[in-house]
Amino acid sequence: MLLELMSNGTLAELPPENRPDGIAMPEEPSVVLLLPHNKYLLGTDGGKWIYASSKSDEQPSSVHLYENQVLSLLNEGTRPTIIPADAVNILRKELFSLSEPPGHHAPTVLMLRTFMKEHSVFENPNDFMLEENFSAFMKEDFILYKAYWTLRFSLARGELETAGRIKAWLRADPNVFGMPQNSMKIWFSILNLPDDDALRELQELSFSSLELKHLAEQPASPLVVYNPLSGWLIIGQFGRKVHTIFRVWLYLNHELYHELREAKKMTVHDIIQAVWGEYDTQQAMKERAKYKGADELNR
């Protein structure tokens, strides 16, 4: 894709044949933004961007494009080139849509098989070891799809602890989280209370500020509090050895808590893991929607 930065900060798409001389295009899918002073931005598969010049005597440099942030590019002897946040978001979106999702199929599917060994897709290695064949199964099974992509993204980031949460999520039966009578919320905090928005939501659920402050001061984990007006609040502490790094705050209404605790016979710790796993899958679905192939697979 070839774009040009206009004087008003917007982007205009150009035909590929309008690419100026001196810009070497890579073989993989890419996004090129033409800039003033014979400069350009080149984004390639994997989300890497370089700021370069069509003049061969100038060395390119790596730059990072952050969502919702203005990008300022220095030019020797002239004013910086400013790319507005809206334009940055468009560039990021376009490059993501051309890029393959991160991660690798084989380690993901082999780990997933240990959690879903009863699934028919794992009866034949040709069905699950070949990514194209496995993708066909995922089109028909949204739980398989969500579990796969959540694990794949987490393994790509080295977040191995996500696997335990997906295992608990599968044990809970992911369908329970989508039932209209069940509701849940999740917040995170570093040590003490969560942020002001989370506190407002908790207070709207009939947990008082004084009660929440008292709970945040307790060293025990997990903590379980029942409020007959709304439901259950569960607080879990996580860290290394004796040092707590952060807290997870969960709200479950009466119906969902009963389903997990009484019907599924899950421990409070496993409930935390399962609800957190549901949150992980929701985030993974948003991430998967950015990348190439989302139209065919994402729902």
Image (cartoon, rainbow, N blue to C red):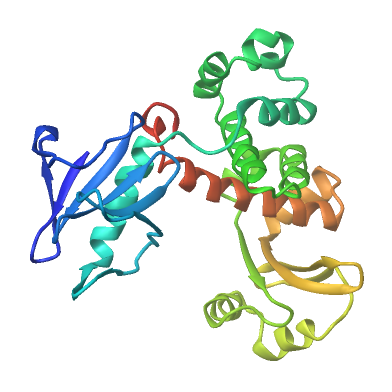
Locate residue 184 relative to residue 35 in the image: left or right: right
Query: Residue 219: x and y, percent?
Result: 88, 79
- Residue at position x 62%, y 50% from top? 280
Locate residue 194 relative to residue 140 in the image: left or right: right
Locate residue 246 relative to residue 71 in the image: left or right: right
Task: Classify 91 as above or below 78.
Answer: above
- Farthest residue toward the front? 57
Query: Residue 81: x and y, percent?
Result: 21, 68
Is residue 226 among the parts visible in the rendering?
no
Q: Nearer the viewer, residue 211 or 107?
A: 107
Q: How many marks?
A: 0
- Residue at position x 78%, y 22% from top? 117
- Residue at position x 62%, y 33% from top? 148
Query: Residue 28: x and y, percent?
Result: 36, 31
- Farthest residue toward the bottom? 210
Q: Nearer the viewer, residue 72 or 294?
A: 72
Which corner quadrant of the image does residue 201 belong to? bottom right
Task: Classify 202 as above or below 1.
Answer: below
Locate residue 168 relative to residue 24 in the image: left or right: right
Query: Residue 96: x and y, percent?
Result: 38, 43
Q: The C terminus is located in which quarter? A: top left
Which corner quadrant of the image does residue 38 belong to? bottom left
